[in-house]
Image: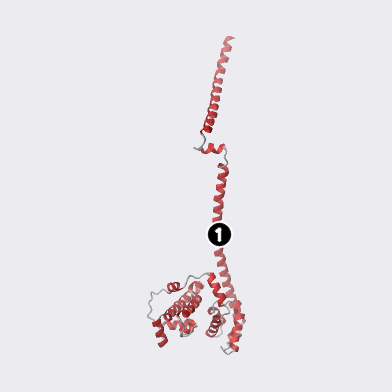
Amino acid sequence: MSGTLDVCEKYYGTRNIYELFSVEKNASVQEIKKAYYRLSLQTHPDRVPESDKKEATEKFKVLSKLYNILSDKDSRAIYDERGVVDDDDDASTNWMDMWQQFFKPLTTEDIQNYQKSYTGSETERTDIKRAYLGGKGCINFMMQTVPFMTCEDEPRIAEIVQEMIDQKEVPEYVIFTKEPKEKRNRRHKKYAREAKIAKEIKQQQQSTASLEQQIALKRKSAFSSLIDSLEAKYGNGNDEADDLFELDEEPPKKRKMQQRKRDASAGQSTKAAKATKKKPATGRKNKSSK
């Protein structure tokens, strides 16, 4: 079974924790914490494609454990003295939970602000140098290692690396300075596909939110229309509305007038009926008199 430093070397190309964190051996806990946060942003499983989550989880776990070692006084002393770490780690440790205890949930604004301060900084230059050496000039490796690096950044980063080569900071790797055109095209097509997928996902999320808002607005509009319709039909103050609802608060005088109208109508109907019955009787009397 591989030890923690073996896994570190496998994924990060070094067994030196301080080198991995880009800090001096006498760095403060706060400096180490800041370095850990920066590196964890690159490896956090929630920020990588589904196909890379398994590897990202392992990288994140070993990174978190190394941070835990340097942030603990006793563990750090043992590592500084012997160059070893305690691999008898509690298997139940949830590194995700530990990370969330240290850092607030990330927002898009947090990431964008960090990207602005990172791009062009000395920290980025150090990361570029480490990635260049770790991948022996492979730009694909650098794309996966340097935070926020995209195809659009390649010319700018090429200038930085060329400056390092000219100053003898790093050796020249032909695979970087004279990268085959076919390899570059494959990389650009891959990242173009990923960018397209990311854009579609974002648009889908925005469309879903927009749809929910439209539904809410339609419901609100329909309810308002219903209220308006009811007000137009029953709220115009006509006597017809009073007749429909037979309101208890109707004035007694008005009720009496309406009752008289109904009684008068009923009386006229009765008289008409009586008159109809008398006509045949009158006819018979006149016939007999003749």
Q: How many marks?
A: 1
In the picture as drawn, the residue positioned furthest to the bottom comes out as 168
Identify the residue at image location x=59%, y=73%: 192
Q: Nearer the viewer, residue 110 or 97?
A: 110
Quarter containing the C terminus: top right
User: Where residue 105 appears, x then y in whole percent?
Assistant: 48, 70
Identify the residue at image location x=56%, y=51%: 222
Identify the residue at image location x=55%, y=47%: 227
Q: Nearer the viewer, residue 194 or 133?
A: 133
Q: Residue 158 occupies which quadrant of the picture?
A: bottom right
Q: Amino acid at mark 1?
A: Leu
Disc 1 crowd rating (10 Å Cα; few below 14, some 14-19, many 20+) is few
**Vertical placement of residue 64 versus 216, above or below:** below
Residue at disc 1, secondary structure: helix
User: Where residue 281 appears, x then y in whole percent?
Assistant: 55, 16
Q: Is residue 14 left or right of residue 160?
A: left
Residue wearing tag 1: 211
Identify the residue at image location x=56%, y=17%: 280
Q: Residue 214 occupies which quadrant of the picture?
A: bottom right
- Residue 15 visible in the snapshot: no
Q: Nearer the viewer, residue 174 or 232?
A: 232
